[in-house]
Image (tube, rainbow, N blue to C red):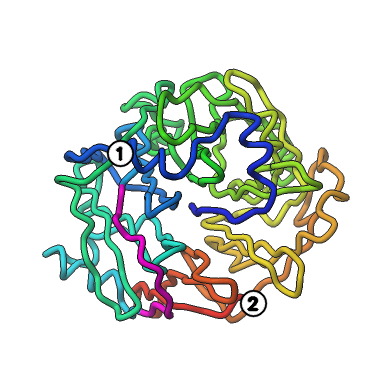
Amino acid sequence: MRKEVPILCLALLLVAVAGAASPGQGLASLKAGKAQLASAGVLAFGPEGVLFVGDSQGAKIFALDTGDRTAGSGAVNVAGINEKVAAMLGSSADQILINDMVVNPVSRKVYLSVSRGRGPDATPVVLRVDAAGKIEELALDNIKHASVELANAPAADAQDRRGNSLRLQAITDLAYADGQVFIAGLSNEEFASNLRSVPFPFANADKGASVEIYHGAHGRWETASPVRTFVPYEIQSEAHLLAAYTCTPLVKFPVAQLKPGTKVVGTTIAELGNRNRPLDMIVYKKGGVDQVLMSNSSRGVMKMSMAGVEKYDAIKDPVEDTKGLPYETIASLKDVEQLDLLDSGHAVILARAEGGALDLRTIPLP
């Protein structure tokens, strides 16, 4: 759930694809007024303190000027952050949902997207937390902002066969890189799983690309399951999106193939275990080698070395357990729901503690 990604050389291909604007142009495009979010879901930081917010209920992406551009540092640690947020908003912890967490790469403050209440009538709230543990609300009544609508999102009342809202999966993850906001989620197309990029400053959002993957744990090709979390990542000087799905295939998509209205087949490079939902993913460097750290609902936090990632063959046959890119489970990290980079040596995590409280903690990168 998402992040500004400092991947070298990604700019060259993205500029060729979409002609990225300068950061200053993006900030200048934002206009003061009320940002009318219907929901606040996944988050990603762009340049100059611009925060992108996925609003699945409204089928929109918002760009908010946080005004948070002063360089900062320091670990962020707040025990029981959900309880403190609930008290601040005049509610109870069981009526608060923290939907995503990201770190401003300049100020190092932590931003949270929150739902006050449950269901479609919940109030969206964006909060930030500094190194001293101070929590404050980002006021949305008069903030410089812009938004772009996803025209082919699932209908507001669309449901899957289990009765779950498809609209809530219109935006499942976001990432910003070199003038582009990458968006994963569901569309109303026949091949519903969708990946798209929207230039910033915003103009219009195209239909995106419908994506298909082979899911080894399920033993079939799939087009209706959305990407749950992803990161932009360069493989052999070519820009890719590295994406994880429920139950848990890891798939790579070349950015150059993700053209509006096309159908793109991803390459499954790992099956990381069934009965599991990937929650969040970051890329960092350790010992001179790129690493991916991924939190999961039932399989802990996985660490994967990207050394030689281009050599793994596509998985196209049923898989009993795991296969492909190897991983190690970080035993010291339990019940991690969100994670993001704080600096080159540390990450901030949102982890469930005994008793159900959520703790915001800074950890050394494993």
Outermost residue, left side:
90
Please state the horizontal and vertical placement of residue 331, each as a whole percent of the image. 62, 79
From the viewer's perspective, tell me whether residue 156 is left or right of residue 16.
left
Among the two numbered marks 1 and 2 on one chain, the one whose residue lies closer to the N terminus:
1
Which stretch is magenta?
Answer: 65-77
**Crowdedness of circle 1 by 10 Å Cα count: few (<14), some, many (20+)?**
some
Provide the secondary structure element on which disc 2 rests.
loop
Tell me: 134 left or right of 99. left
Question: Residue at coordinates 32% horizontally, 60% vertically from top-left?
Answer: 68
The residue that label 2 is drawn on is 366
In magenta stretch: residue 146:
no
Q: Which amino acid does label 2 sit on?
A: Pro
In the image, residue 333 sits, relative to residue 263, either above or below, namely below
Q: How far apart are marks 1 and 2 (CA)?
A: 38 Å
**Under tag 1, what secondary structure?**
loop
| Residue in the picture at 49% in, 70% down | 342
State whether residue 109 is above or below residue 229: below
Image spot of residue 118 (x, y percent): 24, 50
**Which amino acid type is marked by label 1?**
Leu
Q: In the image, is residue 69 part of the stretch drawn in magenta? A: yes
Chief secondary structure of the magenta portion:
loop
- Residue 16 is left or right of residue 135, and the answer is right
Crowd class of label 2 (few under 14; some 14 to 19; many from 20; radius 10 Å): few
Looking at the figure, which quarter contains the C terminus? bottom right
Q: Which mark is residue 201?
A: none
Coordinates of residue 185 in the picture (x, y in percent) = 49, 36
Closest to the observer: 1 or 298?
1
Residue 146 falls in which quadrant of the image?
top left
The residue that mark 1 highlights is 30
